[in-house]
């Protein structure tokens, strides 16, 4: 039994379109995760911008990353609430950062149950 050519052509096109759709979905998902990790990395790397008398450039970089978090984590209600806490409760930066870090860890599925709050609150800053 011979298969008509139009069935072969349609099957080939459908196969290609399905493959394209699946790989695009995985690529977009990967890029979104990569952006989220990059923003979290910036926040963690510049968290010493929240201590007393921080370097102005570090403080600026921290708040740039905080503003990026609003965009990158736009679908996560917990992260957005934690970001808004910086504006609502500006004198509680340490608590706000802990809540934000925990919310981001949950969003990214990073296990944080063994990490104490002090890890988030006390950045690694050399004493001179």
Image (spheres, rainbow, N blue to C red):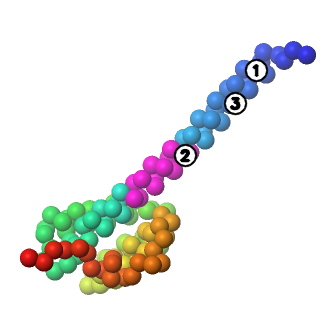
Which residue does the image show at 43% across and 68% down from the upper left? 104
Provide the secondary structure element on which disc 3 rests: helix
Which residue is the site of mark 2?
A: 26
Marks 2,3: beta carbons within 8 A: no
Disc number for residue 99 = none
Q: What is the magenta range?
A: 25-37
Marks 2,1: beta carbons within 8 A: no
Tell whether position 26 is magenta.
yes
State the CA–CA distance, disc 2 to disc 1: 27 Å
Residue 36: x and y, percent? 41, 58
Tell whether position 96 is magenta.
no
Q: Does the magenta stretch mainly form a helix, a strand or a loop?
A: helix
Provide the secondary structure element on which disc 1 rests: helix
Dot 2 or dot 3, earlier in sequence: 3
Dot 1 or dot 3, earlier in sequence: 1
Residue 61: x and y, percent? 22, 62
- Circle 1 Cα neighbour tier, 10 Å, few/some/many (<14 / 14–19 / ≥20): few
Disc number for residue 14 = 3
State the CA–CA distance, disc 1 to disc 3: 10 Å
Provide the secondary structure element on which disc 2 rests: helix
- Circle 2 Cα neighbour tier, 10 Å, few/some/many (<14 / 14–19 / ≥20): few
Disc number for residue 8 = 1
Q: Nearer the viewer, residue 34 or 86?
A: 34
């Amino acid at each position: 039994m011979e298969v008509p050519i139009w069935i072969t052509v349609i099957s080939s096109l459908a196969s290609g379109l399905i493959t394209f759709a699946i790989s695009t979905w995985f690529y977009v998902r990967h890029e979104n995760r990569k952006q989220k990790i990059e923003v979290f990395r910036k926040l963690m790397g510049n968290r010493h911008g929240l201590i007393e008398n921080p370097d102005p450039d570090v403080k600026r970089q921290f708040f740039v990353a905080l503003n990026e978090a609003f965009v990158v984590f736009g679908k996560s209600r917990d992260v957005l609430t934690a970001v808004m806490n910086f504006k609502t409760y500006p004198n509680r930066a340490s608590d706000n950062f802990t809540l934000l870090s925990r919310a981001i860890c949950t969003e990214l599925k990073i296990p944080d149950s063994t990490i104490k709050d002090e890890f988030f609150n006390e950045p690694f800053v050399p004493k001179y």
